[in-house]
Amino acid sequence: QQQVRQSPQSLTVWEGETAILNCSYENSAFDYFPWYQQFPGEGPALLISILSVSDKKEDGRFTIFFNKREKKLSLHIADSQPGDSATYFCAASGNNAGAKLTFGGGTRLTVRP
Amino acid sequence: GALVYQYPRRTICKSGTSMRMECQAVGFQATSVAWYRQSPQKTFELIALSTVNSAIKYEQNFTQEKFPISHPNLSFSSMTVLNAYLEDRGLYLCGARKSNTEVFFGKGTRLTVV
């Protein structure tokens, strides 16, 4: 049973466009949702995160929109750059989970110049 | 800033031998450390979770006998893969939790078994 799902599996956008990556979850106890960016051969790097008490979080070109009622969230990457080409993972954890995260399957983003 | 350093970055071991990997939190004290294995298909498997003042908790399909972990202080953790076989290959990631939320990962140790 996959508790965190991501869509699409892969996404291609043109440079300058906004890329939208989707994530949904099943466990109502999840209250922390980080997004990680991973380049080939590297570990996942924390990009931006949101707590379930918020419905939006912005950091530069990256914005998370969160809908607690529908258990959905999305990562918007504005003005996409070729350097943003990577795999993006949505993850989730609950209170007192420590470093335990439940990951989605990832979205592979390609930004074409 | 918060950094997690993993060593070695990659290692090759013969089938049936063992190898040890290390994880160091730099710039912060990790309240919790989790070890993951990422498959070639990019899926993450949680191996075990180690939290300060609690016993190390292993996930289903992973045992202390196969993946012994040492977490002697808030900055350092090590894990050994004993009797490594082909199915143990992958990218082993250490995630360290800073305060109550953020989990930072190292670059991983890529294990190849020949």
Image (cartoon, coloured by chain):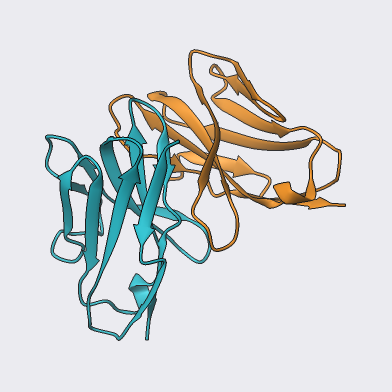
Chain colours: A orange, B cyan
Residue placed at 23% from the left, 83% from the top?
A: B16
Name the residue rendered at 53%, 63% in the picture.
B41
- Give the quarter of the figure containing the N terminus of chain B: top left
Residue B105 rendering spot, x and y as whole percentages: 42, 47
Q: Tell me where residue A60 appears, x and y as whole percent.
A: 69, 27
As drawn, B99 above or below B107: above
Between B106 and A89, the one nearer to me in the picture = B106
Q: Decide if residue B81 is on the left or right side of residue B44.
A: left
Q: Write down the quadrant of residue A19 in the picture.
A: top right
Q: Residue at x 65, y 32 (%)?
A: A75
Q: Give residue B86's position: percent from left, percent from top.
A: 36, 79
A42 over A63 or under it: above or below: below
Give the quarter of the figure containing the C terminus of chain B. Answer: bottom left
Most extreme residue toward the top is A53
Q: Is residue A11 among the parts visible in the rendering?
A: no
Q: Is residue B71 above or below residue B53?
A: below
A40 on left or right of B39: right
- Image location (x, y in percent) of residue B67: 21, 62
On the picture, is A63 further left or further right than B55? right
Residue A45 seen anywhere in this rendered image of the structure: yes
